[in-house]
Image (cartoon, rainbow, N blue to C red):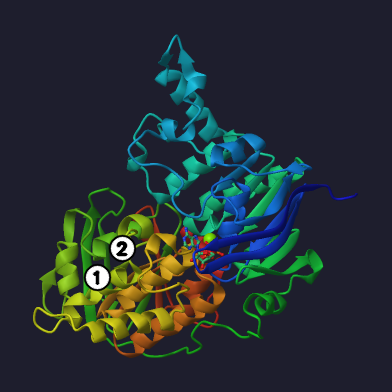
Amino acid sequence: MEKELIFEARKLTKHFGPTVALNEVDFKVYRGQITGLIGENGSGKSTITSIAAGMQPATSGEMFYRGKPHKPATMIEGQKAGIGMIVQEQGTISGISIAQNIFLGQENRFRRAGVISKKKMNAEAKKALEDIGVKGIDPSLPIDVLNMQERKLVEIAKVVYGKPEMIVVDETTTALSQTGREIIYGIMKKMKDENKAVVFISHDLEELMETCDTLTVLRDGSLIATLPKDEMQEDAIKRHMVGREMKGDYYRSDYGTEVSKEVVLTVDNVTSGTGMLMNFSMKVHKGEILGIGGLSHCGMHELGRVLFGEEKLLEGSVTYLPTGDKITSARNALLLGFGYVSKDRDREALVLTGSIKDNILSAGLDKLKKGPFLPPADAKSYVQKQVVDLSVKCASVEQDVQYLSGGNKQKVVFGKWVGRDCDVLILDCPTRGVDIGVKAAMYQLIYKMKQQGKTIVMISEELPELIGMCDRLLILRDGELSGEFMRDADLNENMIIDVMI
Ligand SMILES: Nc1ncnc2c1ncn2[C@@H]1O[C@H](COP(=O)(O)OP(=O)(O)OP(=O)(O)O)[C@@H](O)[C@H]1O
Ligand SMILES: [Mg+2]
């Protein structure tokens, strides 16, 4: 069957000041297909798709949608034309209800005699959520009561409700746990079966190769290749992405390395305020990389917050043994030499309106200061080192963090804490949205810290990374420990999944 073109960009170009985010890109999307988009952090994936969806204008070039010139001035115009986009960052708005988020800009549909019927709106919102398989969320509640994954699901329901002919899924899967991922895969498959179109952005090669019919590779704002299914091989894709050969595994390769017996951190019978952790206990050793995994509501993200003193405890305690201190607040954890990379980077981990430099310095200030002074040369070299180590793609370190690409923001969060030289580092999904090259650099930095005797707790939704990096792995289920695995060359995902569900 002849493939039918639904969207086309011709010589699409986008400049942000001196940055060329897109350079004369020709990009085609066909009906009945899932079109993958891959490229290093900052290569232009979000930029090209957000222009198609009407979120920002191009500098030059043309777009065509369903055979006609396409130049949406706003996201609402894009939606009306039939293009929906699930954005990489937070796509919902705080301060209003879940239902209001779903029907933002369309409230008039529920207006009768000048008054908006909240009841009708809430009922319709409930239906929109159920349509994508989400139950048990009351749409009349403020959106702020939801966690990051639930907010993403609300955004997905909103986009799907608009019945788009083409959707863009921008790096969404890493914000979701397995249950959420199943929902998004289901939606993509249904769209494909209905002869609609999907553009799928991800850094997970395996996921892309499995899901996509064709894969387009961007590098530095240029289109490098478009591969049909039978040409999608891992090494070839990586080569197109980075422009050189990139082989080998990026996890640590040692097995049977002894971990010190010295316990650094203990969690004793903790029940958290949210009730997500129930009577939970564990120990972490010096120089250990302890992995924490599980399904969406298992309590692993709460555990991260508990370790850093960010969650109220109903019972139990967290103790830092070298000093005997109890962890009672983030401030106190910070002073004891803890660091915490939060999963929700935009809300908890970054000051978006601050510069890259200020964000990176914010965690290291106390260590860099000489008395009350911060020597500018020291500050500069400190920031520069993080930016170079993690190849943060930016015009200058004075640039606001909010204008960085998603993966580059994540690198700033990571650099902020790694630079501080913490004794205990709590990492919650540290490689979320980060491209494969930088992932490798992050794993090396984590391993180096282990070798320096630092203690690392790595919380992750990615089993391969837990298996690949951790000395020991704890699996949580419904707020309780359901399994423990030691580092082993024979450890595989199936053994772990068995205790997850
Ligand atoms: N509003 C903006 N202001 C300035 N520069 C921007 C802005 N938006 C994007 N950029 C720059 O444009 C380039 C492309 O960014 P884009 O977000 O498209 O990357 P990406 O491929 O989606 O990366 P990631 O995998 O990290 O999400 C980057 O260098 C980024 O810093
Ligand atoms: Mg992006």
Percent coordinates x, y for residue 48 in the rendering? 61, 57
Q: Nearer the viewer, residue 73 or 372?
A: 73
**Does residue 451 sit above or below 461 in this rendering?**
below
Choose mark 2 or mark 1, whichever is in front. 2
Tag shown at residue 354: 2
Q: In the structure shown, which secondary structural element does the residue marked by tag 1 occupy?
A: helix
Residue 315 appears left or right of 96 = left
Image mark count: 2
State whether residue 310 appears in this view. Answer: yes
Q: In the structure shown, which secondary structural element does the residue marked by tag 2 occupy?
A: loop
Some atom of ligand 1 lies within 8 Å of the CB belonging to the residue at label 1: no
Mark 2: few/some/many CA within 10 Å (<14, 14-19, 20+): some
Q: Which residue is mark 1?
A: 362
Tell me, yes or no, whether the two marked residues, 2 and 1, touch with CB atoms within 8 Å.
yes
Some atom of ligand 1 lies within 8 Å of the CB belonging to the residue at label 2: no
Disc 2/disc 1 C-alpha distance (Å): 10 Å
Q: Nearer the viewer, residue 399 or 146?
A: 399
**Does residue 272 sit above or below 485 in this rendering?**
above
Percent coordinates x, y for residue 118 in the rendering? 40, 21
Residue at horizontal 31 percent and vertical 51 percent from the top: 276
Mark 1: few/some/many CA within 10 Å (<14, 14-19, 20+): some
Residue at horizontal 69 percent and vertical 63 percent from the top: 25
Percent coordinates x, y for residue 484 in the rendering? 40, 70
In the rendered structure, which amino acid carries the disc numbered 2? Gly
Residue at horizontal 43 percent and vertical 64 percent from the top: 293
Residue at horizontal 34 percent and vertical 35 percent from the top: 142
The quadrant in which residue 80 appears is: top right
Percent coordinates x, y for residue 300 in the rendering? 36, 60
